[in-house]
Amino acid sequence: MMKILHLIIPLYILFSLVPAAHAGQKKLKIFVVSSYHKEYLWEQEANEGFCAGMLDFKFLDSREQADEYTLNDQVETDKIIIKKSWLDSKRKSSRSEIEKSALAILSRINAFGPDLIVLGDDNASNFVGSQYIDSAIPVVFRGIVGTPVKYGLADSIEHPGHNVTGVLKLGYPKETIKYFLKLVPSARTFAILADGSETSRAKVKEIIQFEETGKSPLKLVETVMTNSYTDWQNAALRLQGKVDAFFIINHNTIKGDDGRTLDPFKVIAWYLQNIKKPEMTWEKQFVQEGLLMTVDDSAFKQGYEVVRMADMVIHQKKNPEGIPCILPSRGKIMVNRQRAKMLGFDLSGKEFIEEYEDKSLALEKYPQ
């Protein structure tokens, strides 16, 4: 009997300790901050990529967990807790509004005590990420249109040198102009229409620099950057008599005369109904809204690749200071068939087009 007890007791102690040890394991905590809001098309696609990455790199175990995170902005499993906050800087775009939102998010982050912070796009990286530079918490970003060096987050793209690294979003304006000419070979001149956001400033600068090299096949006639809807409309109407095409950048911080941020679908619906010149843009979401074409800077890839960076930091135990920032490959060459029909374009034989949109979300919401 004593011999049996000598065998059973150690086994009993061993197995009784397993649940206690498991209960005492510290769950990984990740806090995600988006610069924008949940209804923003770019953010929805970036979240699809993020969830796909979280599954592929074994942060999450099931599609149901990913769906719960998407629906509730948080999920808790037996090994991880993820929470998400929205800076909402497209609709609340003044510096004071962004700073107020950032302070509230910083309070949530500090109360949560994350093991990793994931930041989406420029404003989150600038207003939130800058508060954790050289802290004990590693940070990975996606979607910085400018440069992390500009925000003081990195010494260089190749060697960040701090606790921050991530995924760049430089866009493909050169490629967009090149393929636009295949679609509209008669075009010679263009104008830029943009809002006054941080995102637009970076993209406009890149297009201007390309045009100044003398290598652009289209001549840039004028650049308009404004958050005034009236000014934006008047510029579009005036310039359509002077140029062959438009390059439409972001239009999400445009405000009406009452100072309130307008629904970007309303802005684009007006444009599509009143401007008869073809246009380029730089992201899939705007072709979904109804603009003619883009070489997409893929939001899905942005979301996926930021999880790859998180995997390096968390699972591979690499120090962010030595992980170079990366730039994903381009998305697809996209054309909106409805806009092409409105403009009278024949798309037959345009074999370079890789994806079509068949409707305009803006015109569906704000029909003629």
Image: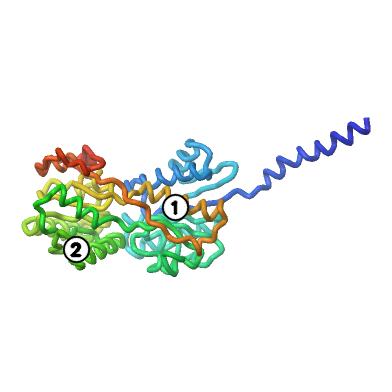
- Location of residue 165 with respect to 183 vertically, above or below: below
**Looking at the picture, how far across and down is residue 88, in whole percent?**
36, 54
- Location of residue 23 with respect to 2 vertically, above or below: below
Q: Residues within 10 Å of mark 2 (few under 14, many from 20)?
A: few
Which residue is pictured at 51% across the width and 61% down the height? 320
Q: Look at label 2 and name its amino acid.
A: Lys
Q: Residues within 10 Å of mark 1 (few under 14, many from 20)?
A: many
**Looking at the picture, how far across and down is residue 46, in whole percent?**
38, 47
Asked whether the viewer can see residue 113, the reply is no
Report the side of 149 relative to 193 (left or right).
right
CA gap, disc 1 to disc 2?
33 Å
Which residue is pictured at 46% across the width and 66% down the height? 159
Q: What residue is shown with label 2?
A: 215
Report the side of 98 relative to 278 (left or right).
right
Q: The C terminus is located in which quarter?
A: top left
Q: 208 and 330: which one is in front?
A: 330
Q: Nearer the viewer, mark 1 or mark 2?
A: 2
Q: 206 and 359: which one is in front?
A: 206
**Looking at the picture, how far across and down is residue 63, in whole percent?**
47, 36
Asked whether the viewer can see residue 107, the reply is yes
Q: Secondary structure at mark 2?
A: loop
**Looking at the picture, how far across and down is residue 340, in whole percent?**
14, 42
Q: Look at label 1 and name its amino acid.
A: Val
Q: The N terminus is located in which quarter?
A: top right
Which label sits on residue 98?
Answer: none
Q: What residue is shown with label 1?
A: 306
Q: Earlier in the sequence, mark 1 or mark 2?
A: 2
Q: Secondary structure at mark 1?
A: helix
Residue found farthest to the top:
1
Colouring chosen for the image of the structure: rainbow
Which residue is pictured at 51% across the width and 43% down the height? 75
